């Protein structure tokens, strides 16, 4: 069993004379609170301060007897760097030894406790000002007084943890019943903790979901489900080939007067489950955590399970018995530490009071908005560990409080239908607001005749597109009327895109009309193209009587071809496929002279109209267009 030592390390930074300092001198006043674990009569530490350039400002070794009261406490004053550009300074505290006995004469073996290693805090060293930096460490130490197996202790809460695959004879554990009713191989993830009976301490347990990751599939087991047997969709959530035939959860409090709380999860491994690893994490405390997170500003121990349980390929059992902090080949259950500035969060809890109720979603604000809008989820019972999706798209969650979560979508969801908003806890859906949000589509029309690039906005992974080729121009001047140009082709579809990636495009130009006083065809419209798709331009109209194919042929499109132009005068060209623009307008009945064009094609993709009367040319075709919706 291990015991926790509570260390409080206070670092005050200020100005003053500094030995071995870099830049303007500052002062660091460091103090360590007494260790709460009885029997420790001395502790040694290494202190180091570095500036932003990673230059060492100072480093010293101090001990509790020389710089404190011999009970683990210590104080020291040293420099920091307040020079411009030197901040932030980094203060590092390293525990290098614990001692017992009179005068701290007996070194406590390092193997009997779990050293968290160097602990760092970033601080601003300000001239003529003091800055306090606090290191608060809860240290796990072997106590060798466990109630079963090997145990650790968290701040006067003693815990035993293990993962077992075999029994005392080395045979596979056969506990849970498979679909045929036979007992089959079972892995036990065990956790039991008790408060200090002498102090009447309470016991709180915190746990993550148990994850079984195999070569062909993954399963999540909800430790808050049950108690009792679980099944797929009822406490078990699988992807790929289900690696489990079942699971069970047993949790509660023993009635022995020691406030001993246990939380055991059993997972039944399918016969074909190969390459499987069981992972989870848990911790304990004599007090309730806020929102399931270890205390801010502290280094808190927790137990981490990471054990390979079946062999790759064969699926043979690869685990045995794995006590907490066991040596290979019985390792995989270990004591780790949260960072001083990075608390560990746990999804599920079990304690003296009822666990947090399932969350509810009451509203999403705004209910309709473009995808780039930040959403606020209002409800009850939210935790900092909760996750959320909108239409199946993940949110980057910012926890506000138990009644509010802020959601920044990591991608843009579909915009065609109302979307469900789901809050999940530990990988399991906990609350759903049906049709809680609908995204307003973003529409963009590219109408300038050019070749350019469009960049997919962050989060956009699919774009609906429509392409129109340019319309063909009307025929040139003859003594009779001339034919109109053909409409541009039309293409439509959906393209997969990568956010923040640029895509080239071309908007086709409309074809010019035939020249004045020349019996020639109007020019063909330009092709519009994007995402590897294209819509061809319409063919220009011919002068009347020049051949049998006088009207311009419609442009080719993947979805629809443009319609052919008209052979009669005073009639515009055809539209550019389904949903395309109108054809060229009717020609004027007035002979306006050689420079008077007739029947300009209507965008997008309409063909130019034919001429009317002598010395009057046909109209130009309309430009193409690209429309995007995302």
Image (spheres, rainbow, N blue to C red):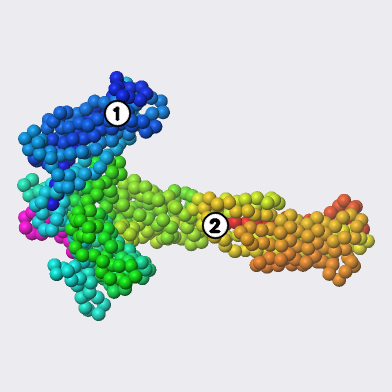
Local crowd size for mark 1, using a 10 Å CA cut-off: few (<14), some (14–19), many (≥20): many
Q: Which residue is mark 2?
A: 497
Q: Residue at x 51, y 61 (%)?
A: 416
Pointers 2 and 1 in contact (C-beta within 8 Å): no
Mark 1, residue position: 58
Estimate the x, y position of residue 126 in percent, counting from the top left: 34, 25
Q: Earlier in the sequence, mark 2 or mark 1?
A: 1
Q: Secondary structure at mark 2?
A: loop
Considering every residue shown, the one lying at the far bottom of the view is 180
Residue 316 visible in rendering: yes
256 inside magenta stretch? yes
Q: Which residues are magenta?
A: 247-262
Q: Quadrant of the C terminus?
A: bottom right
State which quadrant residue 330 falls in. Answer: bottom left
Q: What is the x, y in percent for residue 623?
A: 73, 55
Q: Is residue 190 left or right of residue 274?
A: left
Residue 605 percent location from the top left of the image: 72, 59
Residue 370 seen in the current view: no
């Amino acid at each position: 069993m291990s015991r926790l030592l509570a260390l409080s390390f206070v670092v005050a930074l200020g100005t003053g004379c500094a030995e071995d300092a870099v830049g303007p001198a500052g002062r660091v006043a460091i103090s360590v609170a007494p260790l709460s674990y009885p029997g420790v009569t001395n502790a040694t530490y290494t202190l180091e301060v570095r500036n932003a350039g990673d230059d060492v400002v100072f480093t010293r070794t101090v001990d509790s007897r020389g710089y404190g009261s011999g009970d683990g406490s210590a104080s020291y004053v040293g420099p920091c760097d307040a020079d411009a550009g030197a901040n932030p300074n980094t203060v590092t505290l390293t525990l290098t030894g614990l001692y017992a006995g009179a005068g701290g004469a007996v070194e406590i073996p390092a193997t009997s406790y779990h050293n968290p290693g160097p602990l760092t805090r970033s601080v601003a060293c300000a001239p003529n000002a003091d800055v306090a930096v606090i290191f608060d460490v809860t240290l796990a130490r072997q106590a060798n007084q466990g109630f079963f197996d090997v145990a650790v202790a968290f701040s006067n809460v003693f815990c035993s943890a293990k993962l077992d695959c075999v029994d005392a004879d080395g045979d596979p554990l056969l506990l849970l019943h498979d679909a045929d009713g036979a007992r089959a191989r079972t892995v036990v993830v065990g956790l039991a903790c008790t408060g200090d009976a002498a102090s009447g301490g309470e016991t709180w347990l915190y746990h993550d979901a148990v994850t079984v990751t195999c070569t062909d599939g993954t399963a999540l087991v909800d430790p808050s489900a049950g108690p009792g047997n679980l099944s797929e969709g009822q406490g078990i959530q699988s992807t790929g080939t289900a690696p489990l035939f079942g699971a069970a959860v047993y949790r509660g409090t023993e009635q022995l007067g020691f406030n001993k709380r246990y939380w055991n999860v059993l997972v039944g491994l399918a016969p074909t489950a190969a390459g499987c690893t069981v992972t989870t994490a848990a911790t304990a405390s004599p007090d309730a955590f806020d929102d399931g997170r270890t205390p801010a500003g502290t280094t808190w121990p927790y137990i981490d399970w990471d054990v390979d349980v079946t062999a790759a390929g064969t699926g043979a059992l690869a685990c045995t018995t794995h006590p907490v902090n066991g040596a290979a080949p019985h390792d995989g259950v270990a004591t780790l530490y949260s960072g001083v500035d990075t608390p560990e969060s746990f999804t599920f809890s079990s304690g003296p009071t009822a666990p947090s109720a399932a969350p509810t979603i009451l509203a999403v604000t705004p209910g309709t908005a473009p995808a780039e809008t930040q959403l606020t989820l209002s409800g009850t019972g939210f935790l900092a560990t909760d996750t959320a999706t909108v239409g199946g798209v993940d949110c980057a969650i910012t926890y506000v409080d138990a009644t509010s979560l802020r959601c920044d979508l990591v991608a843009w969801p579909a915009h065609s239908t109302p979307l469900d908003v789901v809050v999940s806890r530990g990988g399991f859906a906990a609350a759903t607001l049906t049709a809680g949000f609908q995204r307003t589509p973003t529409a963009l029309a590219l109408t300038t005749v050019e070749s350019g690039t469009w960049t997919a906005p962050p989060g956009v992974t699919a774009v609906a597109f429509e392409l129109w080729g340019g319309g063909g121009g009307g025929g040139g001047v003859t003594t009779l009327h001339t034919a109109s140009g053909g409409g541009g082709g039309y293409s439509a579809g959906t393209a997969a895109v990568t956010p923040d990636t640029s895509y080239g495009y071309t908007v086709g130009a409309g074809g010019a009309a035939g020249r004045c006083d020349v019996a020639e065809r109007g020019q063909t419209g330009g092709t519009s193209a994007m995402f590897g798709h294209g819509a061809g331009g319409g063919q220009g109209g011919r002068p009347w009587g020049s051949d049998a194919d006088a009207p311009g042929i419609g442009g080719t499109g993947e979805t629809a071809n443009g319609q052919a132009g008209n052979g009669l005068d005073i009639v515009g060209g055809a539209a550019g496929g389904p949903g395309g623009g109108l054809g060229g307008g009717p020609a004027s009945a007035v002979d306006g002279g050689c420079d008077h064009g007739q029947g300009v094609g209507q965008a997008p993709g309409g063909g130019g109209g034919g001429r009317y009367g002598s010395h009057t040319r046909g109209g130009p075709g309309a430009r193409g267009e690209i429309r995007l919706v995302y």
